[in-house]
Amino acid sequence: MVKILRMFEGQFGRLVLSEASGPLAPLDCAEHLVLVKQSGSDGSYAVAGEPVPFTRNDVVLVNARQRFEFHRSAEGAPTRFVTCHFSDAWLRERFPALFSAGRAAPFRSVHEPITPRIRRLADVLVTEAVNDRFLSADRLEFMLQELMLSIIDSYLASKRVSSPLWRGSRFTDHRIRKALALLREKPNKEHNMDDLAAQVGLSRSRFYDLFQASTGLPPRSYLDLLCVESAIAKLSGESTRIGDVSEQLGFSAQSNFTRFFLSQVGIAPSEYRRASAHAGAVDPPPADD
């Protein structure tokens, strides 16, 4: 039995937060899927007949029209997980070489060890899902684009900067991908964008033009979204003081961070943390075994 806790739709396709307390009937899904476990009992998938473990340390990648089914132990807490049903049109527009109409199986493996970046994105997606009244469509789109970029970087594209899988993509320029990696490595409001442009070998004007064309955002707006993502990840840990979050993100005063978070999310950081705790109390996430 599967219970849908939250579901969101957009140009990207569909994002579903679910809990499974029993096996899933075999499915043939029309979309490419990415599944990440959040909490509860471990389980396993069978994708095209191949057994795949499903734990917090794994990500499951299912090509469109592949048959898959979910199994879990009858004991233990229900398995909570996120499933991203990616739209073919959304994927082709961003990554045409990888998700072109003639490419049947872009995911070469149905199971990969999860990276720290993908783990954090999945955790933040769950936090944002349970606090859905504060989640904007733009922020959700941004996180799902980040998720797919991380999947391609980690599992699909070769380590060569000129991998053919980036051809025709918005993100084909390796200098912009390097800039994105540097911003993700340490989201901080003190980043100097002129220095970042020089670090990746671009003039200021060329950097801004290429960055906007690649991400759909100016560099500073992209950094703001990374800072919000980082703040939400830190706020969801009860041991992290808001003053520490502010300092880690490069704000000169906690009041400046509060104003920034309020403008981006629509609620103060302390209220967001309380809302997260309340959402957990109303709909408690199962504890990991």
Image (cartoon, grey):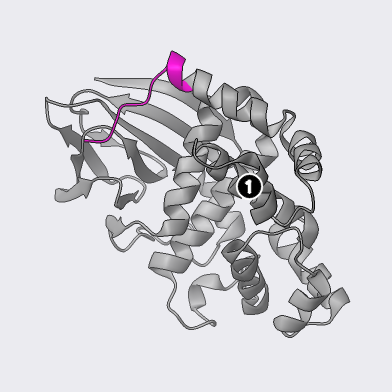
Q: Provide the major secondary structure of the magenta segment.
A: loop
Q: Residue at image x 61%, y 55%? A: 93
Percent of width and height locating residue 221: 77, 53
Percent of width and height locating residue 113: 30, 59
Position of 21 with respect to 159 (left or right) is left
Q: Residue at image x 63%, y 48%? A: 244
Percent of width and height locating residue 144: 55, 47
In magenta segment, residue 282 = yes
Percent of width and height locating residue 230: 59, 49
Magenta-highlighted residues: 280-289
Position of 269 with respect to 190 (left or right) is left
Position of 33 with respect to 246 (left or right) is left
Bin the neighbour count of mark 1 within 10 Å (Cα to Cα): few under 14, some 14-19, many 20 and up: many
Quadrant (top left, top right, bottom left, bottom right) of the N terminus? top left
In magenta segment, residue 190 = no
The amino acid beneath tag 1 is Val
> In the figure, 250 relative to 153: above or below?
above
> In the figure, 196 relative to 56: above or below?
below
